[in-house]
Amino acid sequence: MNKQQILKESIVIFDKYLQQGLKDAMKLTLKKLFSKAEVASSNQQEQELFNQYRQLKNGAKQFSGLIRTKIKEMPDFISAEVNKSDSKMSLSLVEDEELSISLALTQLDSTLEVVSHAELYTLEKRMNLIFENEKIDKTNMPFSPASVVWLFSHAFTQIEFDVPVKTMIVENLVKEFSDDINEAYHEINAVFIKAGILPNIKPEMIRPKSSGQDGQAAQDQAIDQTATDEQSASVQSGAGQVQGGGSGPSGGAAGQPGSLPGQAGGHAVHQSGSAGYPAGGSAGGNVESGYAGIPGQSGQTQQEARQLVESIFDLLSPPRGSAVSQNSDAVSQQSVANVDIDQALEQIGQDTGVVATSKNIGNLKEMLTDQVRNNTGNYYPELSPRQHKTLDLMGMVYDEIENDKTIDTHIRSSFNAINVPLLRTAIKDESFFTDNGHPARKFMELLVESSQKWHGTNVIKKIHQYSDTAAKSFDGSTQSFVKALEELTQYLKVTQTRAERAEQKWISAAEGKEKMDITKAQVDEHLQDILEGCDIKFIRDIVDHVWRDSLTLTLLREGKDSQQWDEKIDSAKTIAQIGNKMEFMKLSGPDKLKAMHQLDQTMDELGFSKRDRLSTKDNIHMCLSWQESDELNKEEKKPSLKKVLSIDEAVKTAEIETANKKIEDIRELSDEEKEMRSQVVNMPYGTLFDFIINQQNDVKRRKLSWVSTVSDRVLFVDLIGRHPHKMKLARLAIDLCRKNIIRVQLPEGGYFKNALNRIVNRLKKLAA
């Protein structure tokens, strides 16, 4: 099978999977745009969203065609570029790409690379053979994540989609295509294997007998054991190690309750592998001294941190297959220096993405030993117990981050970018685990803190560029982390200031609204007295919906002791008297004319249309004529009044609001809800809450900004100070008790320290 035939078959496979992922991503984008348009806050926003919806719906087929054309062109383009250049070329974004699109595409590249690194690595080696040079790598090979980014970046320039639409397509493609990319690569690799290019052969390695292991069975077990089994055995052996503490058959030698069963001098090896840490004492003793009293402390000293890390290391026994023996010469022949590990990690990071969670650490160890073997010529390299445990501990820290629901999942791409620099730092710098001020650790802490504080916002996606910069400029020192920490801190400070200013705008508006509500309540008391005895509905509506607003504005502007207030009150009383037969007889002609003039002037000030003002005046005259008619003529038909559109609309709105009573208006709060209401009143501003917004338990994180017991109102804003959300205190108490709204409790004292405490807790439970 020749090169063109292989590429042709590979293109068909890649196009099939990518087109399906793109199709699903565009469907999700259309659904999201339609949903957002339905709940738009203004007509302008609704129209804009529907325009984007129609734009994507009409252009979806054309966009798919553009991607397909670019896929077919890509191998020839890469081949031509590589052959005419002496240096390696990389597929890149369009230079003038929008920042939001660039960030989305960068995250797409990072996610796909991490998900598919195993299949991608083998495909890269095969691609180098058919292109007949070594200039092809993951940054320029066809079908790689970088090529996917290149495809979309160049296709976007030829399609008239708005920037938000393009960004949403890429974000949804991350979800859809990452599930299928490994299948695509597997099928493409199968095409190469069928053509006889680098068939997937795994040579068997036979390791010579070590003095720390007896018999061929132990050797076979060490060779064949998978990485996942290694870690599982590590935790289980740690459990047995603690259980065996003290004297007895399972306790090991006297005075060494932490010794491994069947391992002579095992504790001595542990001591020698703990350079820079306090050595001596049993594993059980270290657990007690390192863990007791740590949780809940606000200021953890460096000594306490060391003891905590030693407690974890003591609970982690060396994995099966490691060379642990009394013969120091045998150990030195297989041991790997930290500098060799550092070099191997750097090379692995350049070749492929690294996932650092526990389930992937075993694979990483295998890759490390293979790389060290290639670099040093040591055919049987073995990580030291300390190196094993350091990698295992980093995997468990990443497990804590991955499983924490308070952390925005989008931050994972930022962590994936710095996985290798963090692992290299942890291996060669033991202060990483114990020094709260270590730059790499502070940067890691800031990423976690940001993902909690800015959960669900675009800030999380923009943070990725700082991690990416730190990873690319990492030279083995902490300088790249120092610079990234400084730049990210500055960016978050500016973002925080903008969010606070935006939030203050809504707080001021809420305070003004509360003042208005209090004033309306005072006016309402006066109107109830004024309208008592008014029998004509039209007259009641006029006083209720015209003089209410007028009196409210007068009270706010002039005050209760002003002449304007007295005049308004007198006019309202006069108009109300027209609706009562007995009181009407007491009115003089000048009083009626003055009240009519005041009514017309007030409606004009409030912005009523001229038609409504004339209709109101005619209706008042009709009411006057009806009231002036003979009192004995009770059979006289009531007057037919003209419609006043503004008044009718106001009446209907009031009736709807009365009919649609909320649950908090219908029933009293339970004792639990009353207690919750009191707690909310005393909560500090800035407290975070997760609002469950649908049946899939998706959440929107909001910040408590303002609480008033006067108006019984609560104001929330989103994390960047926009989209205010108002609700009653009673409603909030009910939802909190029903778990429809959940208070977010962010850990104090540093995430890393708390993660170490949770890890030691978990290991102790396994050991128990």
Image (cartoon, helix red, strand yellow):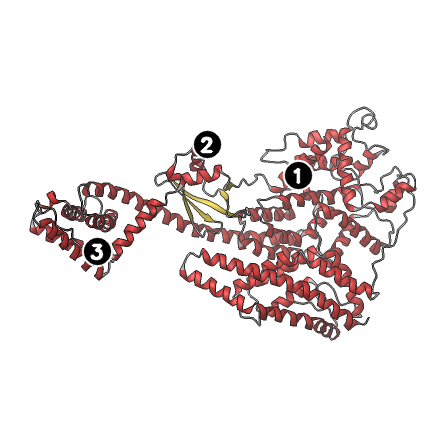
Q: Which secondary structure lies at badge 3?
A: helix
The amino acid type of the residue labelled 2 equals Glu
Mark 2 or 1: in front is 2
Structural distance between the alpha carbons of marks 1 and 3 = 69 Å
For residue 437, say whether it is visible: no
**Which mark, residue 400?**
none
**Which mark, residue 672?**
2
Q: Nearer the viewer, residue 459 or 628?
A: 628
Residue 163 screen position, x and y as percent = 53, 64
Q: Nearer the viewer, residue 442 or 478?
A: 442
Per the image, the residue denoted by label 1 is 756
Q: Specify few, some or many for label 2: CA neighbours under 10 Å numbering under 14, 14-19, or 20 or more.
A: few
Circle nearer the N terminus (2, 1)? 2
Q: Specify few, some or many for label 1: CA neighbours under 10 Å numbering under 14, 14-19, or 20 or more.
A: many
- The residue sitting at the front extreme is 635
When the figure is inspected, residue 342 is found, relative to residue 271, above or below; the finding is below
Circle nearer the N terminus (3, 2)? 3
Q: Nearer the viewer, residue 127 or 750?
A: 127
